[in-house]
Amino acid sequence: MARTKDFNEDEVLNKAVCLFWHRGYNGTSMQDLVDTLGISRSSLYDTFGDKHALYIKALERYQEKGSNQINELLNQKAPAKEVIKQLLELSVSSLLNDEQKKGCFMVNAEVEGAAHDDTVKAIVCKGDQQMEDAFYRVISKGQQSGEITNKQDAKVLARFIFNTIKGIRVTARSTGDKKLFSDIINTTMLLLD
């Protein structure tokens, strides 16, 4: 007869996201996982597989939540430029309000492991493409309504804005200078005029 689990898998996975986000894959040991997740090593292996499998599940969970939040913002009925500015400001405020200065879990994973871990690379690339596509849809809508300039291709603008957000996510790990980020946002918005 199979034993029932005495823990909530979603709660444990959310704890794993926080731990890997804070320490990275290489900085997190199996003992750290056991201690932080509050489950035995055997339960961890039985439920999630090895450390790498749990890390991949944590990245996927983070990406899913982030994508849902961003798509909700990008799909609202507000003017396209307003939506883009809100997303840039949301990125900055969430990073600057993080006292631990963890940065973006996905960007951290990309820097730490995408070059030598094909699974991490695939997750990062999938997330990047989803974000670029979402920006493309908003920018195209704004160009069709005349709100955003047609001087640049919508795909080029989408790539630039997405790369700007990635840069903000990296820069916020080392500075909390609100003026710097305000300048970045304002300059990015000028490209849409």
Image: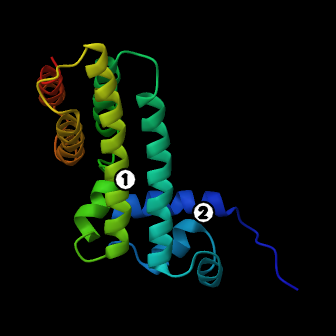
Q: Nearer the viewer, residue 90 or 12?
A: 90
Q: Nearer the viewer, residue 84 or 144?
A: 144
Look at the picture and state if 26 lies above or below 61.
below
Figure colour scheme: rainbow
The numbered dot on residue 12 is: 2
Image-based side of 112 in relation to 119, left or right: left
**Residue found at x 16% / y 40%:** 175
Residue 89 visible in rendering: no
Q: Could you classify mark 1 by the number of other residues whose Cα lies within 10 Å: few (under 14), some (14-19), or many (20 or more)?
A: some
State which quadrant residue 186 falls in: top left
What is the spatial separation of the Cα atoms under label 1 and label 2, in whole angstroms?
A: 23 Å
Query: In the image, residue 64 lies at what x, y percent?
Result: 49, 51
Residue 7 visible in rendering: yes
Q: Residue furthest right?
A: 1
Q: Nearer the viewer, residue 4 or 152?
A: 152
Q: Nearer the viewer, residue 54 or 27?
A: 54
Q: From the image, which quarter does the C terminus lie in?
A: top left
In terms of sequence position, does the residue under pointer 1 or pointer 2 come before the other?
A: 2
Query: In the image, residue 34 lies at what x, y percent?
Result: 55, 75
Element carrying mark 1: helix
* Residue, disc 1: 127
The numbered dot on residue 185 is: none
**Residue found at x 26% / y 21%:** 143
Image-based side of 149 in relation to 61, left or right: left
Query: In the image, residue 50 lies at what x, y percent?
Result: 51, 82
- 1 or 2: mark nearer the eye: 1
Look at the picture and state if 174 lies above or below 31.
above
- The amino acid marked with disc number 1 is Gly
**Residue found at x 36% / y 15%:** 79
Element carrying mark 2: helix
Look at the picture and state if 99 lies above or below 145.
below
Q: From the image, which quarter does the N terminus lie in?
A: bottom right
